[in-house]
Image (cartoon, rainbow, N blue to C red):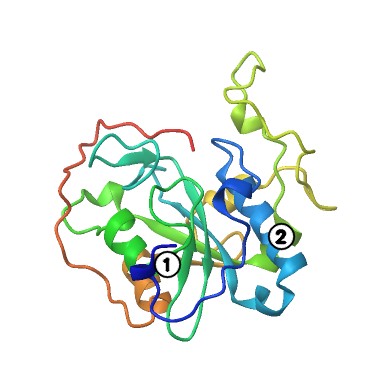
């Protein structure tokens, strides 16, 4: 982590980015594995850790500072998942697909990766489903069928470990991606509400986005 991204002495609760379990385009499982590691190695802080699904009704959400971005243009995901560690002074974001520090402060992530919904078409406004890490670990299931084409071939190579499942389900990913507050786990926030609630001293940015997204822009698979 860059020195300037530390507002106080902070203990990083995950392995280095290079040592984390990571599979490209399986962000939900990457974050599940981070939650699993934190529960095993840092049980004392697991109640302050959350999985955060970012999407909207159209499943088209722009994020900047992603490895897939071209220059200063955003990538438009159908959904993305990050890990949030809250604190009294500052909250920290762990994103295995960002070019920002790992972790970085929520205020930095807001400014550089989220930017603002101001200036975006409403259809691109971001929503966030925030799920306590322990709930995510005990409730999430995926048979990875969303990553297969009509012929049953993998769009992207899956993780080498077995599919994640619970006693109740083998596949409930859609309930986590959905931004319908009446279903699923956790709580759904608008971007402004999320930053206000978890940002500590940070406040939602009012800066204009430098990129205007058009309705015909397409979402990428995360």
- Residue 198, by quadrant, is bottom left
Q: Is residue 5 above or below residue 75?
A: below
Question: Could you tell whether 201 is left or right of 53 in the image?
Answer: left
Question: Could you tell whether 96 is left or right of 150 in the image?
Answer: left
| Most distant residue in the top direction | 151
Pointers 2 and 1 in contact (C-beta within 8 Å)? no
* Labelled disc at residue 37: 2
Q: Is residue 79 above or below residue 188?
A: above
The residue lying toward the viewer, choosing from 59 and 12, is 12
Q: Residues within 10 Å of mark 1 (few under 14, many from 20)?
A: some
Point out the tag, 2 or 1, that comes first from the N-terminus: 2
Question: Could you tell whether 116 is left or right of 1 in the image?
Answer: left
Which of the two marks, 2 or 1, is nearer to us in this view?
Answer: 2
| Image coords of residue 140 (percent x, y) | 70, 53
Instruction: Tell me what residue is drawn at x 48 percent, y 57 percent.
Output: 102
Q: Secondary structure at mark 2?
A: helix
Instruction: Tell me what residue is drawn at x 71 percent, y 43 percent.
Output: 171
Count of numbered labels shown in the rendering: 2
Distance Cα–Cα, label 2 vs label 1: 26 Å
Q: Residues within 10 Å of mark 2 (few under 14, many from 20)?
A: some
| Image coords of residue 17 (percent x, y) | 55, 51
| Most distant residue in the bottom direction | 88
Instruction: Tell me what residue is drawn at x 31 percent, y 69 percent.
Output: 192
| Image coords of residue 141 (percent x, y) | 72, 48
What quarter of the picture does the N terminus occupy? bottom left
Q: Secondary structure at mark 1?
A: strand
| Image coords of residue 12 (percent x, y) | 56, 68
Residue that badge 1 annotates = 189
């Amino acid at each position: 982590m860059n020195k300037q991204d530390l507002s106080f002495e902070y203990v990083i609760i995950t392995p280095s980015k290079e040592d984390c379990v990571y599979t490209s385009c399986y962000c939900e499982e990457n974050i599940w594995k981070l939650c699993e590691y934190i529960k095993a190695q840092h049980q004392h802080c697991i109640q302050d850790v959350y999985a955060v699904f970012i999407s909207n009704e159209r499943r088209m959400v722009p994020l900047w500072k992603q490895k897939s971005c071209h220059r200063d243009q955003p990538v438009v995901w159908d959904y993305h998942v990050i890990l949030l560690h809250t604190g009294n002074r500052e909250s920290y974001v762990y994103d295995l697909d960002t070019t920002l520090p790992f972790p970085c402060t929520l205020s930095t992530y807001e400014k550089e990766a989220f930017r603002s919904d101001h200036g975006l078409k409403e259809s691109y406004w971001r929503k966030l489903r925030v799920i306590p890490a322990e709930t995510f670990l005990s409730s999430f299931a995926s048979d990875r069928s969303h990553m297969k084409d009509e012929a049953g071939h993998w769009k992207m190579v899956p993780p080498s470990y077995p599919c994640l499942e619970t006693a109740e389900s083998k596949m409930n990913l859609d309930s986590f991606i959905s931004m319908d507050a009446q279903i699923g786990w956790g709580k759904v926030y608008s971007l402004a509400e999320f930053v206000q609630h978890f940002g500590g001293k940070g406040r939602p940015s009012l800066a204009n986005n430098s990129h205007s997204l058009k309705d015909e822009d397409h979402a990428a698979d995360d």
